[in-house]
Amino acid sequence: MTMARFRVNSPSVIHQTFVSEVVIVNLEAGTYFSLRGSGAEIWDGILRRLSEDEIVADLLRPGEAMGGREFLARFQDL
């Protein structure tokens, strides 16, 4: 089974990390987002081309369970 992987929609979407914050700008839509904490960690996983489940595994503590698709669904519109 193939795990879904996300990628940055370059060149329309640009990003920059500032210490503990990631700023993402969609140049076509004219929108921007600021991510901190787990949002910044998820973005890092996307940049590393991790699968949905790999990103979730990086975030969850042992014993917690949640499907990667459910957890990342809200980030698909970036």
Image: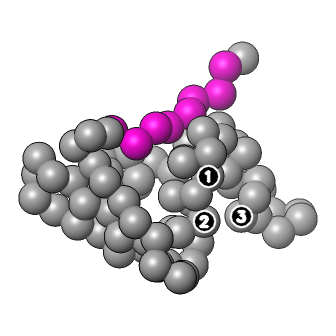
Is residue 60 visible to the viewer in this orientation of the structure?
yes
* Residue at (53, 82) in percent of width and height: 19
Distance between the alpha carbons at the discs numbered 2 and 1? 6 Å
The image quarter containing residue 52 is top right
Q: Do the residues labelled 3 and 2 touch (CB within 8 Å)?
A: yes
Q: How many labels does the image show?
A: 3
Q: SS for tag 3?
A: helix
Distance between the alpha carbons at the discs numbered 3 and 2? 8 Å
* Residue at (35, 70) in percent of width and height: 23
* Residue at (60, 65) in percent of width and height: 41
The majority secondary structure of the magenta stretch comes to loop
The extreme bottom residue here reads 19
| Residue behind mark 1 | 45
Of residue 43 and residue 53, the one placed in the foreground of this image is 43
| Residue behind mark 2 | 41
Q: Neighbour class for label 2 at 10 Å: few (<14), some, many (≥20)?
A: some
Side of 38 where 27 appears, left or right: left
Q: Neighbour class for label 1 at 10 Å: few (<14), some, many (≥20)?
A: many
Q: Do the residues labelled 2 and 1 touch (CB within 8 Å)?
A: yes
Q: Which of marks 3 and 2 is in front?
A: 2
Residue 47 position, x and y percent, is: 54, 48
Of residue 19 and residue 72, the one placed in the foreground of this image is 19
Which amino acid does the dot numbered 2 rest on? Glu
Q: What stretch is highlighted in magenta?
A: 2-9
| Residue behind mark 3 | 59
Residue 20 position, x and y percent, is: 54, 82
Residue 26 position, x and y percent, is: 21, 54
Side of 47 where 31 appears, left or right: left
